Amino acid sequence: TVNITLNGLKVAVPASSTILDSCKANNCFVPTLCYHPRLPESGSCRLCLVDVEGCGSPLPACRTKVWEGMNICTETERVADAVRLNLEMIAQNHCFSCASCAVDGECELQDLLRIYGIPQPANTITPLLFGGSSAIACDSTKCVACGRCVQACAALQGLGVWEYGGRAHASLPQTSGHAPLDATACINCGQCATFCPTGALTERDQVAEVMAVIRAKKAAGKTVVIQTAPAVRVTISEAFGMEPGTVTTGQLVAALKKAGFDHVFDVDFAADLTIMEEGTELLSRLGKGGPMMTSCCPGWVNFVEKHYPDFIPNLSSCKSPQGMMGAVVKTYWAEKMGIAPEDIFLVSAMPCTAKKDEAARPQLEGDVDVVLTTRELARLLKLHRPGVNFSTLAPESFSDPHGLGDSTGAAVLFGASGGVMEAALRTVHAVVTGEELPDALLDLEGAVRPNGESLHTATVPVGDANVRVAVVHGLQATREFLERLKAGEEYDFVEVMACPGGCVGGGGNPSSQDGDILARRTAGIYGDDVNMAVRRSHKNEGVKALYDEFLGSPNGHKSHELLHTTYTD
Ligand code: HC1
Ligand code: SF4
């Protein structure tokens, strides 16, 4: 450690700290825009200025390491003036249409202008002409050139869609040649959007569309249904000011019912169904050349189709749980309820921008009508007045007489990297050996939990066989792993999630400045599994009834027709 003085207070901090680390650790406010604890620092915004005794001008806190005896002051008039000047310059290049901006109220620039008392200039700015995608909206007039999108796309995902330069506004991140996102390396994971501090990159906002359907549902004769993804139960709470990792499944269900959804289903039901289908598929593919690769993450599926089409035959043919639920709701459930499928409007609440793109795939046409990200869902619930006071709502259960609200702890695990693998092995073990894993060993002694590693491999005994598995998340790590497969490494079953951490790190989640956010959300997921009454997918009563009454057997004819899909290269 080294000893420093921070605003007159003597503190000891680790010798490797920057001034900014030291300030954060001691609850001392320093303004930032380009800095993010999960990204390489770029030092471009020049807002984190502090005075250091003996230095002629303020220093950038994010780039300056502490030294023994350093005397730092964050509160001098000189620092405040310099920050104000830099903020005013940033504001001059920003188009303030806050009332219609998707991130109004959650915008880091808006907050800083308020803190420093800087008025919003009435700017007119010519936008850069490049389009978004079915999932991501781009508005260069909101860009503050912080470069967080550039860092997230390159460092976390290894894609490099965003770059500085081009024909105009060379200082702003843009796509190469101003190509529309769909024509670039982009796979719609939305990491750029979740790291963007303003409304320059957001999900394609469909909140108003869903609210209009709810308002008109009686007149239009529509039944409005929503399914909520595994990760949403743990990340939505952050949007309502709760501690990261807080699981609020019951409050979420209650809030959605109050907001006008007629039925609230759990995507976890379909995650259990996926395990039945994918586990059966794995058993039929073992030993026949491999590995089989999971197919529930649309960012990953897009990555394979766009960048590694040679691996398309390795993808499981299973639709994702969102797609399976869509197919089941509009056939089995519609029939049970006596509702025409075209009168059902199915919304998915997902931690993921790529799920918007997945729902638009021709192969899934009609399964899901609109996908809202967790951020959009939070906005919808906040807009719904009177009175969705989320944190104090009395919890309600997913409910459905036909079992589509049933779910298990195995399904909850899908929300974190390694979870699909663990859920699958719980069931595959029971099918192969005829014996259930004891409760205390349901986590397979942590064998497939990545614990912060971006690639985790293990060999798991299942009966007489040893199943060689790999869990990988984040596309930079995925690309490296696929190159190892090409070079001859062998596995039987591989789980890939495009986003770092899996869906808890999905690009549709609330933004967070917490460097430990993925671990905290993952802990919430693991805790929820333990708290569930049923923790094995093959014990889901609703799923059993669906097979008995409608589908027949896993991987049977009807399952193939409704629950499986194809890919395009
Ligand atoms: Fe996911 Fe999945 S876990 S892909 O991350 O397989 O989005 O949460 O809903 O479909 O179940 C996302 C999450 C989600 C699917 C499931
Ligand atoms: Fe979406 Fe999850 Fe895949 Fe990220 S990891 S792209 S959130 S499905």
Image (spheres, rainbow, N blue to C red):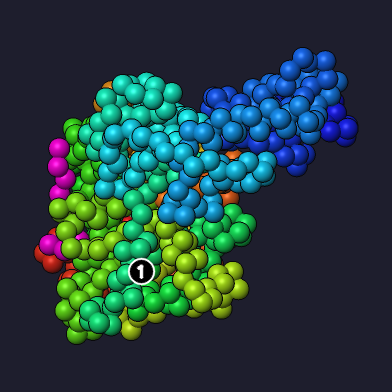
Q: What count of labels does the image hold?
A: 1
Quadrant assignment, res 424: bottom left
Q: Residue at x 37, y 75 (%)?
A: 261
Q: Amino acid at mark 1?
A: Met
Quadrant assignment, res 115: top right
The quarter of the rendering in which ligand 1 is drawn is: bottom left
- Circle 1: element type: helix
Q: Viewer-proximal residue, 478 or 334?
A: 334
Location of residue 521 in the rendering, given as x and y in whole percent from the top left corner: 54, 52
The answer to if 389 sits in the magenta stretch is no
Give the class, few, some or many, for how many residues have Cα within 10 Å of label 1's Cα (few <14, many ≥20).
some
Location of residue 174 in the rendering, given as x and y in whole percent from the top left corner: 36, 29
Location of residue 516 in the rendering, given as x and y in whole percent from the top left corner: 59, 43
Q: Viewer-proximal residue, 173 or 295?
A: 173
Q: Is residue 390 visible?
A: yes
Q: Viewer-proximal residue, 95 or 561?
A: 95
By secondary structure, the bulk of the magenta-drawn segment is best described as loop
Q: Which residue matches tag 1? A: 211
Q: Is residue 185 above or below residue 191?
A: above
Q: Residue at x 49, y 42 (%)?
A: 122
Image quadrant holding the C terminus, namely top left
Image quadrant holding the N terminus, namely top right
Q: Residue at x 70, y 21 (%)?
A: 59
Q: Is residue 500 visible?
A: no
Q: Is residue 11 above or below residue 364?
A: above
Q: Residue at x 29, y 77 (%)?
A: 216
Location of residue 272 in the rendering, given as x and y in whole percent from the top left corner: 34, 64
> In the displayed structure, does residue 146 sit left or right of residue 312?
right
Q: Which residues make up the magenta segment?
A: 561-569
